[in-house]
Amino acid sequence: MMMANDIRPEPSAKTGERLLDVKGLTIEIETRNGPATIVDGIDLHVDKGETLGIVGESGCGKSLTMLSMMRLLPNKIKVTKGEANFAGRDLQKMSNSELRKVRGGEVGFIFQDPMTSLNPVMRIGQQLAEPLIYHRGMSKAEARKRAGELLKLVGIPGAEDRLDAYPHELSGGMRQRVMIAIGLACNPQLLIADEPTTALDVTIQAQIVDLVKDLRDKLGMSVVWITHDLALIAGLVDRINVLYAGTVVEDAPVDALFANPSHPYTQGLLASIPKLSDERSARLSSIGGTPPEPGRRPKGCPFAPRCPLVEAICHERVPTLEGLNHDGAHRVACFVAQRKLEAA
Amino acid sequence: MSVVPMTTTPIEIEPPVSLWRDAWHRLRRNRLAVFGLIVVVILAFAAIFGPYLTPYDFLSQDLNSRNMAPSLSHLFGTDDLGRDVFSRVVYGTRTAFLVAIVVTFIAVLIGVTLGALAGFFGGWLDRIVMWLTDMTMSIPNLLLVVVINASLKSPITSWMESRYLATLNPVYRETIWVDFLLVFGSMALISWPPYARLVRAQVLSIRSRPYITAAQALGLTNRIILMRYVVPNALGPLIVAVSAGLGTAMVLESAFSFLGVGVNPPTPSWGNMISDGLRVWQHYPHLLAAPAAVLGLASVAFSFLGDGLNDALNPRGAK
Amino acid sequence: MAAQPLMRIENLVKHFHVRLGAFGERAATVHALDDVNFDIFEGETLSLVGESGCGKSTTGFTLLNLHRATEGKVIYQGKNIVELDEKAMRPYRRQLQIVFQDPYSTLNPRMTIGEAVGEPILFHKLATKAELKDRIATLLADVGLPPRFASRYPHELSGGQRQRVAIARALACQPKFIVCDEAISALDVSVQAQIINLLLDLQQKYGLTYLFIAHDLAVVRHISDRVGVMYLGRLAELATREELFEHPLHPYTKALLSAVPEADPVHERSRKRQILQGDVPSPLSPPSGCRFHTRCPIAMDICGKVVPEWREARPGHMVACHAVTEGLPG
C-alpha cells in the first residue's frame, strides 16, 4: 500500500489487500541491434479476490509482463528493472527453485493454445497429478483421486474415465477445460489466464468464460485475464488495465472504463468494436497507423504518433498514470485527458 | 461515451531491404562464416589463376633439388622428383575445384529436377523418383566408384589409344580426361539423392503455403507458380546444401585420388599428393603436411560457410 | 436486389477422403460440405458464419473451384464453373477473387509488393507494361498505401498493411466477386476496423459482391446484407441481417447469437446466456438426421432420423429445422 491515491472501488469479494503488486517492471529483448525495451516500467496490481482484465493489442506486452515475471520466457527476454511482489515476496529476488514452488502452486496458469500447452504423450490424469505430487506432496493414489475431482469441477463429462485419455482424444474446448483443471490443481491464490479462449469457437468461448467465473466465485481466488477482446471480459472482470506499447495507459473499474473511457487509445478501441445499433455500411471508427515496434518507441507518449488529440507536450514527456479528481480509482496516463478532466 | 474522430497518421518506415540483402548482413556478422568465405574466395582465385602465377610448373622436375625442406624459393619444399610442392598444391586446388564444381553442378541438376517434379506433381512420379533415390543411396559409394573404375577405365583408355593411332588426332592422346570423366560421372551418380530429397521436401512444404493457393486463385499457370513461387522460396536451403556439398565433393575427390581410383598422377590432386607424402612422412613431413593442411582448410571453410549461410538464410526468431 | 443472382449454388457437396491410423490403413470421408444451396446477388455482402469445421471456408474454396466439388453446381454467367478444368476456368479466375485469413503467409516472401500486385495485371493483360507502374500506384492508393510501398517486401509490413496488399492484388484483376475468407480474423481490433472500412469503401467504388466468411458475429452484423449460418457442413439458416439477428429461427443460430459478448459490462453481468452443451461432433461421422440434434435443446424424435428440409419459413428467410417447419403449411 505505497501509493497515495489508493482509493479502490469496493465490489463484492475484494478485501483491498494486495496480492500481486508490480512496480516499474522493465522488460528487454535481445535483438540483433542490441536490447530493445518491450515493457517500459509498468505498474500494476491485483487485490485479493479481484479479477483484473489486461487488454491490449498484439505486441503490447500484456502476456510478456505476466510470463516474464514468472520467468517463463526464453533467455532472450529479460526483466531488467523493477519488482513484482506476490503475497509480500519479491518474485524477482527468488531463486529458481523458490519460484517453481510459486508457479503452479500459488499461481496457476491457463494458456492460449490448449493443444500445444499439454504434453501430447502423457495421459491427462498424469498431467493433472504432477503438480499435486510436486507441490502438495500427495501420493499417486491421492493425486489421481484429486485429479478426477478436478476434471469434474471443470465440467468434463465422465471425468474419471477421461483420466486415461491423451490430449489428442479430446476436443479443443475439453482440452482447455483440462488446462484450467491443471491451473487450479493446487488451489492457487491467483489464476493467470493468457488469452485462454482465443483459439476457441464462440459457443465454447462462452462456456469457458462462464466456467472461470463460477470457479472464481466458488474458490475465491484472484484472476488476471489477458485478452485483446474488451467485450469478452466486460461481464467477468472487476477492473481493467489497458496496455499500449508496454505501458498501462488506463486503469479503471470495469463500469467506469466502458462508461467513460478517458485515454484516446481506449476510446479508439471501444469505438472500433462494431455495435448492434450501427447502420450497415456505417464506417467504423478506427485508429490509424500501427503500434510502435520494440526498440523504435517514440520519445514521449508512445501513443502520440497515432493520437487524434496529440499536443506538443506529448512528444516531449511521458505521461504517468494519475487518478482523475472525481474518481481516484480511475487512472489515466494522458496529458490531455488529465487536463480536460481537471478543468471540468 | 465521447468518440474521438480518429485520423490516419503516416508511419515512417525504413528503406526496403530484400531478403537476400538481409541475409548478407547476417552472414557478414558471423565471423566463422566470413572466415570460410575468405578462404573459399582465396582458394577459388588460386584454382583459376594460380597455375599461371606460380614460379614453377607443376610438372617440371629438378633432380638436383629433391625432397627439399620449405624455403623462400620453394614455399612448401620440393618432392622426390624435385617438383615444387607449392605449385602442385595450387594445381591440386584447380583439380579439386573443377571436380567439385562439375560434380555438384551435375548432381544439383539431376537432384533439383527430379525432386521438384516429384514434389510438385506427386503421385506415381513421386513414387518412382523416391524409389530411385533410395536405391541410389543404398549403394556403397566406394564400391560403386571402384567398380566403375575397374570396369570402364581400361576399355575407354584402350579405345582412345586405338583412335589416336588411327587418326593421330591429339584429342585422343590426353587420357587424363578419362580420369575426370569417370570421377565426375561416378561421383555425380552418388551425390544427387540428397539434393532430390531436399528439394522435394521443400516443394512439398511450399506447395501447401497459402501464397500458392493465392497464386492459383489469381489463375496463374503451374509453370509460373513453379518458377516464381516455388523455386525462389526453395533456393535458400539449396544454396546451403550446395555450399556444404562443394566441400564434401572436394573431400570425396581427395579420398578417391588417395585410393587411386580418382585423379591419377601426374595430374596433382590433394588426394594423390597425400598418398605420396604418406609413404615418406617420417623423413619429409612437409610432403604430407602441405596438401593435407590445404585440404583440411578447404573442408572446414566450406563447412563454416554452409553453416553461416544456413543461419543467414533461415533466421529463426527473425520476422 | 436484382432477381437474377450473380452466382447460384446448387446442392454443393464436398467430401475429403483421408486415411487414418498409423499406416493409413483406414479410409474415411470428411463430410466437409453437404447439400448446400444458396444464391449470391450482385452488389451484396453475403456472410457465412459458424464454428470451426462447419464448412464455411470449404464453401468459399469449392465455389471458386480451388477445391474440386464432389457434387453439385455453381452457376456463374450461365456456366457451371465447378466442372471446368484449370484452363477453362482461367477467364473466370480473374473475375472471382479471394482474400485469405493470414496476411503473413499469403504473399510470396521473395516478391516485392509491386511485383505481387503487378503480376495478375500482366498475366491477365489488363494493362501494358508502360501503364503498369501507374496502375500499381492507383491500386495501392485504393487500399490506402503510398506508392513507395511498391518496392518493399512483405516482411517489412505490418499485418494490416499486408492485408491491404492482398486486397490490392485481388482488385488488380478487376473482379466482380471477392471471397473474404476470415480476411480480418487475424488482425488486431483497431486494424480490423480499418480493413472493414476499406472493404466497404471498395465495394461502393467498384460495385463488388462479397462472400464474407467469418466467425466474429459482431463484424458480420456490421457489414452483411444477408447472413448464412452453417453447422457441420450444412446450412442451418439464411436470412437478411435484420431478420437473422432480430428473429433467429434455428436453435443453433439462437445459441450462437447468445454466446456473442457485448461491450457492455452491466448488460453482460445480468444477461442469461443459452450455453450449448458439448462440442461439435466430428465431420468424419456426422450425426444422422439433423446434424445439430445431438446438442439441440429442443430436439425431437424425428430430428435424429430425417434430414430437415431447406425451406423458406418467412419471405427470404431460409431454415433447415423440423421444429420450425412443422408449423408451416405443406
Image: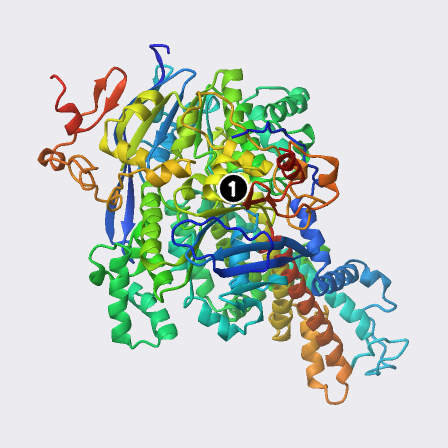
Q: Is residue B94 left or right of residue A243?
A: right
Spot occupied by residue A284 in the image (x, y as percentages of width and height): 51, 27
Vertical comparison of B283 with A273: above or below: below
Q: Quadrant of the N terminus of chain C?
A: top left
Decide which of B229, A163 is in the foreground and name it.
A163
Task: Please name the amino acid that badge 1 sits on.
Answer: Ser
Instruction: Report crowding for label 1: few under 14, some 14 to 19, many 20 or more residues within 10 A (C-alpha).
Output: some
Toward the right, the furthest residue is B72
Picture residue at 28% right of the left edge, 49% below the top: C19
Q: Which residue is mark 1?
A: C105
Asked if residue B161 shows in the view, the reply is: no
Query: What kind of element bears circle 1?
Result: loop
| Residue A42 x, y percent position in the rendering | 60, 54
Q: Residue furthest left?
A: C301
As drawn, C174 above or below A334 = above
Q: Quadrant of residue C152?
A: top right
Seen from the viewer's position, the closer of residues C25 and A293 is: A293
In screen coordinates, is C45 left or right of C312? right
Front position in the image: B19 or C138: C138
Residue at 61% of width from left, 72% of height from top?
B255
The quarter of the rendered structure image containing the C terminus of chain C is top left
Q: Is residue B240 left or right of residue C35?
A: right
Chain at tag 1: C
Q: Position of residue B135 (x, y in %)?
A: 42, 61
Can residue A184 be seen from the camera position used here?
A: yes
Q: Position of residue B40 (x, y in %)?
A: 73, 62
Among the 4 quarters of the image, the one containing residue C318: top left
Nearest the viewer among B74 and B123 is B123
Judge whether C276 appears above or below A171 on screen.
above
**Colour mode?**
rainbow
Residue at image position (26%, 70%) is: A144
- In this view, the residue farthest toward the bottom is B282
